[in-house]
Amino acid sequence: LFEGPWDFVWASTRIDDLPPMVGQEIAFAGRSNVGKSSLINALTRRNALARTSHTPGRTQQLNFFRQVGHDERLTIVDMPGYGYAAVGKEKVAAWTRLIHDYLRGRANLMRVYVLIDARHGIKDVDGDVLETLDKAAASYQVILTKGDALKKSEQEAVIEATAAKIKRRPAAFPEVLLTSSEKGLGIPEFRAAIARALAE
Ligand code: GTP
Ligand code: MG
């Protein structure tokens, strides 16, 4: 599914500036610096497809990536991180609106992957996004990132605690995956989960 070359195709800062819907789409949402761009690079085996950064707020638009030369085309969307105050209130409000509008109105959006830092778990800002997704009936799965920072026993505990937290959320896929883009942890499992979501 992820084989072959990937290309950056479009960046949108406004909801009326989205690229046409082609094939199926999946999107990556999560707090600033949670590791969205890194995970996209790990999945696509491209080191610098999505730009990563130590500075939160690196990704400031909806970035669309598409497989080149495939019939059943998959588009991956890298979203601006939420919950990062230092960029200024106005900008945060604009991003939040863009994210929410996009999540509500994209007909070919098959699943949203909501990334949560395994060291921190689900925070209030994440809860707000999950609420939006539930209200929009947009199917989503929670993916824990930076799992390499935890010991094996801690990894299992955070998976369980996170799964318990989303249990009653109507649009949430019940299985929580733990990943590490840096160490390749959970990446094959995540690829398989995406393939299943697209086949549903
Ligand atoms: P924004 O675009 O600002 O919202 O950030 P992002 O969610 O795209 O995060 P990005 O992928 O740019 O990564 C942010 C920081 O986390 C970088 O310093 C990465 O090196 C680090 N990081 C990403 N993935 C991992 C991981 O699996 N393990 C560890 N330890 N660090 C990671
Ligand atoms: Mg990013």
Image (cartoon, rainbow, N blue to C red):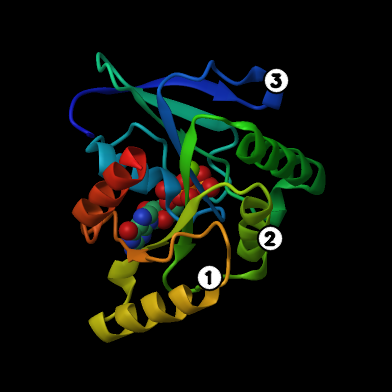
**C-alpha distance separating marks 2 and 3:** 24 Å
Q: Hey, what amino acid is under mark 2?
A: Asp
**C-alpha distance separating marks 3 and 1:** 32 Å
Which residue is the extreme one toward the front? 200
Q: Which quadrant of the structure image shows residue 200?
A: top left
| Towards the viewer: 93 or 198 | 198
- For the residue carrying disc 2, how many other residues have a C-alpha within 10 Å: few (<14), some (14-19), or many (20+)? few
Q: Percent from the top left, x then y, of residue 149?
A: 32, 72
Residue ID at (40%, 22%): 23
In the picture, the disc for residue 128 is 2
Does the residue tagged 2 have its C-beta within 8 Å of any atom of ligand 1?
Answer: no
Marks 2 and 1, the one that precedes in the sequence: 2
Marks 2 and 3, the one that precedes in the sequence: 3
181 lies above or below 164: above
Marks 2 and 1: which is nearer the front? 1
26 lies above or below 158: above
**C-alpha distance separating marks 2 and 1:** 13 Å
- According to the image, label 3 marks what residue? 16
- According to the image, label 1 marks what residue? 166
Marks 3 and 1, the one that precedes in the sequence: 3
- For the residue carrying disc 1, how many other residues have a C-alpha within 10 Å: few (<14), some (14-19), or many (20+)? many
Q: Hey, what amino acid is under mark 1?
A: Ile
Residue ID at (58%, 66%): 169
- For the residue carrying disc 3, how many other residues have a C-alpha within 10 Å: few (<14), some (14-19), or many (20+)? few
In the picture, the disc for residue 32 is none
Q: Is residue 23 left or right of residue 72?
A: right
Q: Percent from the top left, x then y, of residue 184?
A: 21, 56
Where disc 1 sits, the SS reads helix
